[in-house]
Each structure stands twice: as C-alpha cells, then as structure tokens.
Image (tube, grey):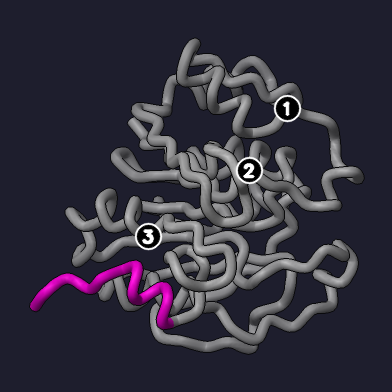
Amino acid sequence: MSAPNLTKLANALGTDKGDAVLYAHGYTKFYSFMFEEFRHEPFTMVEIGLQQGCLDPDALLTRKGEDIPSIKMWLEFFPRADVIGCDISDFSTIKMNRFRFERLDMGDPAALERLASLLPPVRIIVEDASHAAYHQQLALAKLFPIVQPGGFYIIEDLHTTHPITERLPSCSPTAAVVEKFTRTRQIEIPFLSGIERRNLETSIRKTFIHWNDKGGVDRWAMKMVAFEKY
C-alpha cells in the first residue's frame, strides 16, 4: 500500500497545515519527512488546539466545537495511533474511533499537570492553540516530560500571537527563546524554577526549525519548532 500524501490529505480535510487551505502553512511536508518511519506503529499522540480560533478569548469558553480537521488527518495518516485532542472550547460531542477529547486551559499549570498525569507516554505532541508565548512555554515545560524518548514536541505558528497575550504574564517571544537555545542550549523561560529549566534543557536531544514566508507572513520567519526527546 502506498503512503498517503499528507499535504493532499490536509487540503482535502480542511486543515491549514497543508498548502491550500486558509493560511496554508505547509507544515505537512515537514511532518511527512519526520514521521514516516513510525507511521504504522501503535502509539499515542496529542494535539492542542482543534479548530480555527477566534479573537475574543471569552468566546472560546462557550464555543462548541463543530469540526476537527487536523485530528481527522492524523487518524488517517497514523492508522494505529490513539489521538487525544485538547482545547479550551468544548469538543466533547465529537466521537470518533481512536480519538478522545480532554478540555484544557493552557494558562492553568494545574490543568496541564493533570493532563500529564492522565496520559500514557506520548510519541508526538502538536501544540497549535492560542499562539501566546506564555501558553506555549508553560505547556512545553509541563508536557515535555511525558514525551517518549525519540518522540517530538512541536509548537506551531511561532510567527503570530493572540489578543489574550495582554492578560498573561510577560515573557519573551517563543521564537526568541528557541533561537537562543539553538546557540547556547539554555532555555530562558522566566517563570520556571532552575531545576525545571535544567531538566528541560538536558532532555532536548535535537531542535528542528521550520522557516517559510507563507501563511500570513510577508517575510522569512520561524514558524514552527520540533523538539526531539533524548
């Protein structure tokens, strides 16, 4: 059986991780390369952020999720994987084989710790939620420990942010944190303890950065990062 074309699959299902829908980020070419080796293996993966967002942070709390195109893409691309989807909006009415929903507020450290305690070790985490730097960095610190050795933690859309950023603790843009880490192996996340920072720094084996000038930007920009676990 031939491997599915992940980009065509993304376009057909309506996720902008491909190259034809909405912002057309083109991430699927990267994912096809990274994940083909274990595509047919049984494992657990997590995606945070399940539907196109909205600019009103309060509206997200009452929004009812209607579709999960990227989850459908992962379920087809990984025929033996269990996929957990997380969002601050309610997607609990959506039922599919090998999928389950966990509601999550990424700004709540206790909620992230609870999620980590509920899940088995995971092969892939894709974080595509608010794009707020505080959320991105907090979730990385709390969830990276449950990634399996050789697995990946991915943060998408580093080039943009969300109005909710104004309500959150101040921190550097995640792209700047990533860029410094590639040079110094030091993670500058101000709200982490020294032990948390060292644990995170020493557990990252490799860093893969996806740059492009498509999908809502008019310049060459760091748009996505994948951290591989030791």
Bounds of the magenta segment = 1-12
Rendering coords of residue 124 (x, y %): 40, 53
Amino acid of disc 3: Thr
* Residue at (77, 29) in percent of width and height: 171
Amino acid of disc 2: His
* Residue at (60, 32) in percent of width and height: 175
Looking at marks 1 and 3 on the same chain, the residue that comes earlier in the sequence is marked by 3
Instruction: Report the number of numbered marks.
Output: 3
* Residue topped by disc 1: 172
Looking at marks 3 and 2 on the same chain, the residue that comes earlier in the sequence is marked by 3
Residue 214: mark: none
Left of 64 or right of it: where is 20? Answer: left
Classify 63 as above or below 208: below
* Residue topped by disc 3: 28
Kindly state the secondary structure of the residue where label 3 is placed: helix
| Quarter location, residue 194 | top right
Q: Is residue 71 magenta?
A: no
Kindly state the secondary structure of the residue where label 1 is placed: loop
Task: Tell me the mark number nearer the camera, choosing from 1 and 2.
Answer: 2
| Quarter location, residue 76 | bottom left
Quadrant of the snapshot with the N terminus: bottom left
Q: Rate crowding at label 1 as few (under 14), some (14 to 19) or many (20 or more) other CA atoms within 10 Å.
A: few
Q: CA distance from mark 3 to mark 2?
A: 17 Å
**Residue 117 shows in this picture:** no
